[in-house]
Amino acid sequence: MKNYFMTIIQDKRIGKRVDIKKRHTQQFRVFECNTDTCDPISMDLIGEEPFLIRIEDHPYSVVMRTPGNEIWHAAGFCLGEGLVNRPEDIRTIGYDVDLDPNVIDIWLTKERKNKIGHLLKRKSFVSQTSCGICGKEMLKDIQSSVQPAPDGFKLSLDRAMTCIAALSKNQKFYQRTRGSHAALLFGPDGETLAFAEDVGRHNGLDKAVGKAFLDHTLARARILVLSSRISYELVQKAARARIPVIISNSRPTALAATMGKSLNMTLAFPVGEDQIMVVCGEHRFIHNSNYMRGIS
């Protein structure tokens, strides 16, 4: 069987394989909070960056992923999309030295390209160019269109824990199927504004925000509780809705944390029945004289 990976090095259009600094995880300074203290600690968050897959020198799809194994990722994506059926359908695959390391170029055999021409014509996944596909560019784009979250709202650890408990109680679909995500919006006084469940975490958030938006109550939203990990897309959606606080059941990604901090948002997640980790925006948590040590 043809060793198709050898063509990564031999094909001049693809160029030599490049060494990229892997960003699987990123270390952040967070705050470990309980009812008495809130101390700064270091914590690793999973990496999240955009990944552009180019087919026959044209952008085909951008996906969010953890950096690493880009060639495997691109090959698996192409198989799943029906662009290839076997390894031999790929003429070359690899990094282009003239492009961002978050880009993989794939060239198909002539026979395979003729068979899936209708798929290549779609190219409805992406309109981005081949360069500048990185987290920093995404942050700049969002910061240019979304204002930082306003200060003024404060919450206690007890309020945060009460909101988390309310999410579980409302998840009727999850209780029956163990297969849904949920989003719950609270107002400044802890009142419920909207709740929604969906098989997709983005859909659940869109539904909850959409309800509050149509009910003309979205302007009162202060806390968003999610059943899922906080990704950059969810931070972006919350920022657009002007919601300053996101609490989830899992750690945010590194890109989500960076974005949340840049937009003056509070991102947090529970680590027990009476403890919470605050990744950014710790100034919104109510504290006494001994609380929030290390915050400057």
Image (cartoon, rainbow, N blue to C red):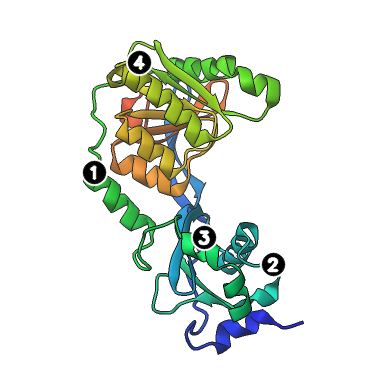
Task: Name the residue located 25 percent from the left edge and 40 percent from the top edge.
Answer: 146
Residue 290 horizontal/vertical position (percent): 37, 23
Residue 145's disc is: 1
Q: Residue at label 4?
A: 187
Q: Earlier in the sequence, mark 2 or mark 1?
A: 2
Q: Earlier in the sequence, mark 1 or mark 3?
A: 3
Q: Is residue 230 above or below residue 102?
A: above
Regarding residue 136, the answer to whether it shows in the image is yes
Residue 189's disc is: none
Name which quarter of the figure residue 77 lies in: bottom right
Q: Give the camera-side residue of 286 and 201.
A: 201
Q: Earlier in the sequence, mark 1 or mark 4?
A: 1
In the orientation shown, which residue stands out farthest toward the right?
1
* Inter-mark Cα distance, 1 to 3: 26 Å
* Inter-mark Cα distance, 2 to 1: 42 Å
For badge 3, the amino acid type reads Pro
Q: Is residue 55 left or right of residue 179?
A: left
Asked whether disc 2 touches disc 1, contact meaning CB atoms under 8 Å apart, the reply is no
Residue 49 horizontal/vertical position (percent): 45, 55
Q: Is residue 159 left or right of residue 169?
A: left
Task: Name the residue located 53 percent from the left edge and 57 percent from the top edge.
Answer: 24
Q: Earlier in the sequence, mark 2 or mark 4?
A: 2
* SS class, disc 4: loop
Residue 120 horizontal/vertical position (percent): 51, 65
Regarding residue 29, the answer to whether it shows in the image is no
For badge 4, the amino acid type reads Gly
Residue 85's disc is: 2
Q: Earlier in the sequence, mark 2 or mark 3?
A: 3
* Inter-mark Cα distance, 2 to 3: 25 Å
Task: Name the residue located 43 percent from the left edge and 30 percent from the top edge.
Answer: 206
Q: Is residue 119 above or below residue 10?
A: above
Q: Residues within 10 Å of mark 3 (few under 14, many from 20)?
A: many
